[in-house]
Image (tube, rainbow, N blue to C red):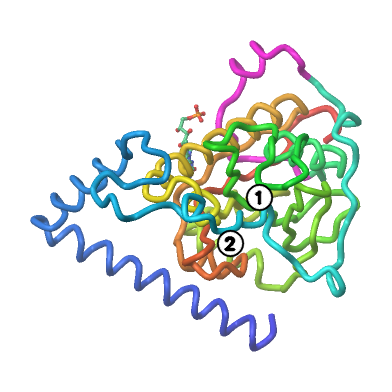
Amino acid sequence: MNQKEQARLKTLNRILEGQLRVKEAAVVDGGNMSRHINELREFMKGYPNTFGEDPRNPEAQSDERKGLPTPPLQKPYDEKTSTLIDLLDPGGACLVHTDIRVLIRQRRSLRAYADSAIPLVSLSYLLWATQGVYTIPKHRTWSLRSVPSAGARHPYETYLHVSRVSGLSPGLYRYLPLSHQLLSLGTRDSLREELFVLTDREAFVADAPLTFIWSCVPYRGEWRYHTMSHKSMLIDAGHICQNLALAAESIGCGSCPIGGYWQEGADRFIGADGQDEYVVYMASVGRRQGSESD
Ligand SMILES: Cc1cc2nc3c(=O)[nH]c(=O)nc-3n(C[C@H](O)[C@H](O)[C@H](O)COP(=O)(O)O)c2cc1C
C-alpha cells in the first residue's frame, strides 16, 4: 500500500472514530433525541400528494413547476477520457431457478460466499434486473426501468466493488444504465481495506466477489416532488435491492443488504460529495458455497 493510500485509510479510521463519538453524544443527550425521533417519524409519513408543492410553505414549488430543465437521467461522465466496458445481453445468463415461488421462498441474506468468480454475463443480468432501462421518450425527461420509481425519477446510481468477476479487473465501476455499459473508476490497493473499515469491519462485505453500492442523486426526485420526494426515494432503494436479491437467487448466488456503514467513508469510497450525491444502500453478492461450478 503506498503512502497516499495509507493516508486515505488513516482518514477513514478517523471518520469512523468521529462518527462513533457523535453517536455516543446523541444517546447521552436524551431530550434532544426524542425530538429528533419525532421528526424522523414525521419524515416517514411524507407529505400529502400535492405534486411539487409543500403544504407547509405554499410559496415553495418544485423546479419542474417553475419550468426548470429536467436533470440528466444518468450521472454524466467524460466521454473522451473514460474507459467503458460493454456488458452482455442479460438473456444469456444461466438461470438455475425460474419459479418465482422458489426464489421468494429460498431468499435469505447470505454472508458467506464461494471463492469462484461471478461470470460477466451474470453481472450483466444483475445490473439489468436492478436498473436496466427499456423505455426512454424522445424528450428524455424520464425512463422506465426494471424496477418501479416514484414519478419514474430513478434517482440512484449503481457503483460496484469488483473482486472476482470473470473478464473484469478488480476495482471500482459505475453502471451506465442508458447504454448498458460499465464505466471504470480504476482501482487502488487499499480498496478492500477501505470497504472493511466503512462497513464497520464486516469482512464478508470486503471479501465478497461483488458489492453493489447505490448512491442517491436527490435532485432528480426533488426536481419533481420537492419536499415530498425524499420518502419515495428511500422506498425506491428497497425495490432495487429486492430485485437484486431475487435475481441473485435465480443464478445460484446469494446477497446481503447492507444498511450499516459509515456515511462519510462510503461517500468518499465512490467519490460522491455527500450533498448532491450520497450512498444510501449496499448489497454484497456471491455464489453459494458448494454450488455446482465452485
Ligand atoms: C434495510 C436493510 C439493512 C440491512 N443492513 C444489514 C447490514 O448492515 N449488515 C447485515 O449483515 N445485514 C443487513 N441486513 C440484512 C438483515 O439483517 C436481514 O434481512 C434480516 O436479518 C432477515 O434475514 P433474511 O434477509 O435472511 O430474511 C439489512 C437488511 C435490510 C432490509
Residue that sits furthest to the front in the current view: 67
Of mark 1 and mark 2, the one earlier in the sequence is 2
Q: Residue at x 56, y 33 (%)?
A: 239
Mark 2, other Cα within 10 Å: few <14 / some 14–19 / many ≥20:
many
Q: Nearer the viewer, residue 257 or 89?
A: 89
Q: Are marks 1 and 2 in contact (CB under 8 Å)?
A: yes
As rendered, which of 257 and 182 lies closer to the eye? 182
Identify the main secondary structure in magenta.
loop
Measured as percent of width and height from the top left, residue 265 is found at: 50, 67
Residue at point 86%, 55% (across, down): 168
Which quarter shows the C terminus?
top right
Q: Secondary structure at mark 2?
A: helix
Residue 142 covered by magenta stretch: no
Bounds of the magenta segment: 97-115
Q: Position of residue 25 (x, y in %)?
A: 20, 66
* Above or below, 68 relative to 273: above
- Residue 288 in sight here: no
Using a 10 Å C-alpha cutoff, classify the residue at mark 1 as few (fewer than 14 neighbours), some (14 to 19) or many (20 or more): many
For label 2, the residue is 195
Tell me the residue that label 1 is attached to. 211
Q: CA distance from mark 1 to mark 2?
A: 10 Å
Residue 106 included in the magenta stretch of the image: yes
Question: Which amino acid is tagged 2?
Answer: Leu
Q: Position of residue 262 (x, y in %)?
A: 45, 61
* Label 1 SS: strand
Q: Judge left or right: residue 221 versus residue 126.
A: left
